[in-house]
Image: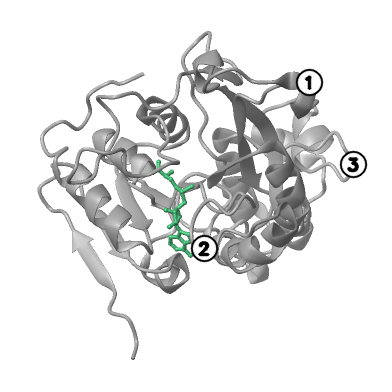
Amino acid sequence: MEEETVVTEIPSLRTGLCWLSQADAMDCYASWPSPACIVSDGAYGIGGFDGDPSDVGGLEAWYRPHVARWSEASSTATTLWFWNTEIGWATVHPLLERNGWKYVRCCVWDKGKSHLAGNINTRTLRQFPCVTEVCVQYVRDRMPSGQRVQDWLRAEWRRSGLPLKDANRACGTRSAATRKYLSADGAFYPPPEEMMERLREFANANGDPSGRPYFAMPEGRFQPKFDCPFGMTNVWRCRQVFSGERVRDAEGRPLHPNQKPLQLMEAIVRCCTDPGEAVWEPFGGVFTASAAAALLGRRAFGAETCARYYEAGAARIAGLAGKEDGRLF
Ligand SMILES: C[S@@+](CC[C@H](N)C(=O)[O-])C[C@H]1O[C@@H](n2cnc3c(N)ncnc32)[C@H](O)[C@@H]1O
């Protein structure tokens, strides 16, 4: 018999809705809108939850179907945050690259020494005690068609029949358009929003009328957003989730061993999304990224297979009503 999928729509949150499902994320992706941000905190290859491979060797196969779906649903404006151990991330990185995700930066979560329970015998351990996880930022390097962004930009300009040098006129730059935005080599970087708009307008106004439209793409931003507070770096010193924030079971015991600090989830969601945009949390646990998204007025779409985690996470989100837009970080 098929298991029933439970979907909780929490309309009490003022800004938009929060969609949480007790289901396999693979069964949810098709119903979620294209994301501005995906927060992945899934398998670590340490046997941490039902279905987590016992070894990092199993991670690529575990993530493969998810990465394929993220890639199909994302746009050039999407940011992916990939949480894992350093070796877990290193193992999955080639898969992400092959699917058109471009590495931006590895951020290190330093949980501090309080994370070390009791005395650690480094003589028997024969390594430095580990107090870190990583959260790695990726952006899309592909158009929805699967074409590389660089190739698409050059192909669209070529298609318009306009001479390459006219791109500089279109952008009001001396040489940046030809040297960077339409370059074939490593000097390439994608045009900022305003320049993208100028290229599009110019090509559609002056290019071969039979090939219009040029540079057609989905509504919204072309580039992913990034905007972080001054002084914040890629080393995040933040202790493990502490008592008040910890989601507990009916007996008051900590429920989820991997619950992430809300302030870190808030920082990554805030910097790459605007209010109203869609944030995906496919491996919800107790839905910390969805909680952060809802507090910030973003729309959250989350899945969790385990009933106990799902119920506690959904109750947690419902309890946030009225608190959105509160600054946490
Ligand atoms: C590392 S935990 C996430 C913790 C979460 N970030 C938090 O702060 O609570 C991963 C969770 O993903 C869930 N999970 C694993 N595979 C899943 C899938 N295919 N779809 C939905 N949830 C899944 C597991 O049950 C586990 O609770």
For mark 2, give the secondary structure.
helix
Q: N-terminal of the two: label 2 or label 1?
A: 2
What's the amino acid at mark 2?
Ala
Which quadrant of the view contains residue 62?
bottom right
Q: Which quarter is ligand 1 in? A: bottom left
Q: Quadrant of residue 28?
A: bottom left
Binning the other alpha carbons within 10 Å of mark 1 as few (below 14), some (14 to 19) or many (20 upward) gives: few
- Seen as rendered, the residue at the extreme right is 185
Q: How is the image coloured?
A: one colour
Q: Nearer the viewer, mark 2 or mark 1?
A: 1
154 vs 18, nearest the viewer: 18
Q: Residue at x 52, y 29 (%)?
A: 226
Q: Are discs 2 and 1 less than 8 Å apart at CB?
A: no
Instruction: Determine whether 125 is above or below 223 in the image.
Output: above
User: Is there CB contact under 8 Å for labels 3 and 2?
Assistant: no
For the point 18% across and 48% down, the residue is 315
| Closer-to-camera residue (57/273) | 57
x%, y% of residue 171? 66, 34
Secondary structure at badge 3 equals loop
Q: Is 267 drawn above or below residue 57 in the view shown?
A: above
**Residue that label 1 marks:** 123
Q: Residue at x 10, y 48 (%)?
A: 12
Find residue 185 and name its label: 3
Q: Using residue 240 as the reference point, say whether residue 236 is left or right of it.
A: right
Residue 37: percent from left, percent from top: 47, 45
- Between the residue at mark 2 and the residue at mark 1, the CA separation in whole angstroms equals 48 Å
The CA distance from mark 3 to mark 2 is 28 Å
Residue at image mark 2: 73
Q: Is residue 275 visible?
A: no
Circle 1: element type: helix
**In the foreground, 202 or 134:** 134
Q: If the image is split into quadrants, where does the N terminus sit? A: bottom left
